[in-house]
Amino acid sequence: MKSKIWTALLALYIVWGSTYLAIRVTIETIPPFFHAGLRFLISGLILVIWQRAAGNALPTRKQWVSAALIGTLLLLGGNGLVAWAEQFIPSGIAALILAASPMFLVIGEALRPNGIKPTWQGIVGLLIGFAGIFILVGPSEISGSGAKLETLGVIALLGACLFWAAGSMYSKSANLPKSSLMSTGAQMLMGSISLFLVSLLTGELNGWDASAVSARSLYGLLYLILAGSLIGFVSYGWLLQNAPISLVSTYAYVNPIIAVFLGSWLASEALEPRIGLAAGIIIGSVIFINSTRTMGQGRKKEVLVENQQ
């Protein structure tokens, strides 16, 4: 089980760290909420059809309702707001702001009835990671290297953190299909409906010329479907059911590192010494959290995730 968890985490780190740039490229010529709706509609159909062909039952009516709530929180509130914000906020800065999401996740999990209370080691690890993020961001990055960040964009990104945390926590106890892939596909399908509705209600399609969509945007959308959704979200959904929330939440510490290095490699962005320092602190926090051996007081004694069969 331990090797499976780390394989899923590695896929999550690499794939989702690259999706910020992919989203930015895609929304150059495709409206943000509409692009997300297309992405999750196609991904959801692939997963549901695949799982149905494999013999897994379709979700029950109650499970579709749960999938709709989770899909709306994660995909509209989380992913949709990120795509909308990246119209005004650079993709790298967006990744850095979203690094606050582990705090929402861990605090929310602690407050949730029967939720897992973080150990002091887990809290220390998260605080260390947050300190690394603070070093990585710094005043100049927060201001966009001299440029003022769009306030609504920052608010949208913080809102995305909140919605993502709420959807992630609810999914831990929601009535969902046994198959994690069927469950993820159902969430994507229902989330795509919410995204299309918001796209229509906000009027972002008014005046949009589909014939003007660039090849770059199409390639970006394809990458988001195949890698971001079919690999990233599947890994995330599986991890939520099989790993401690404090460990799963570390993806938001590592993703900014991936985003920064991709920006340096593909967009010739400066790689300052303090970025290397922050990277070491953040990765160190991930290792520290994973080394935690106890789950704290106020909960039943559990077998460690890495020893589960």
Image (spheres, grey):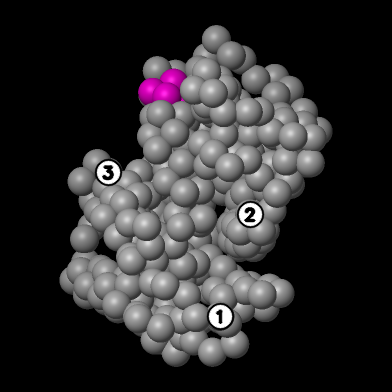
Q: Which residue range is magenta in the image?
A: 218-222
| Numbered mark located on residue 300 in the image | 1
In screen coordinates, is 114 left or right of 178?
right
Contact (CB < 8 A) between labels 2 and 3?
A: no
User: Which label sits in the foreground, 2 or 1?
Assistant: 1
- In the image shown, does 294 or 286 lie closer to the viewer? 294
Left or right of 282? Residue 59 is: right
Judged from this view, the residue extending furthest toward the front is 309
Which residue in the structure is indicated by mark 2? 171
Choose the circle earlier in sequence order: 3 or 1. Answer: 3
For marks 2 and 3, give the one nearer the viewer: 2
Q: What's the amino acid at mark 1?
A: Lys
Residue at 61% over, 15% down: 209
Q: Is residue 220 magenta-colored?
A: yes
Label 3: how many Cα within 10 Å (few below 14, some 14–19, many 20+): few
Q: Which sits earlier in the primary sequence, circle 2 or circle 3?
A: 2
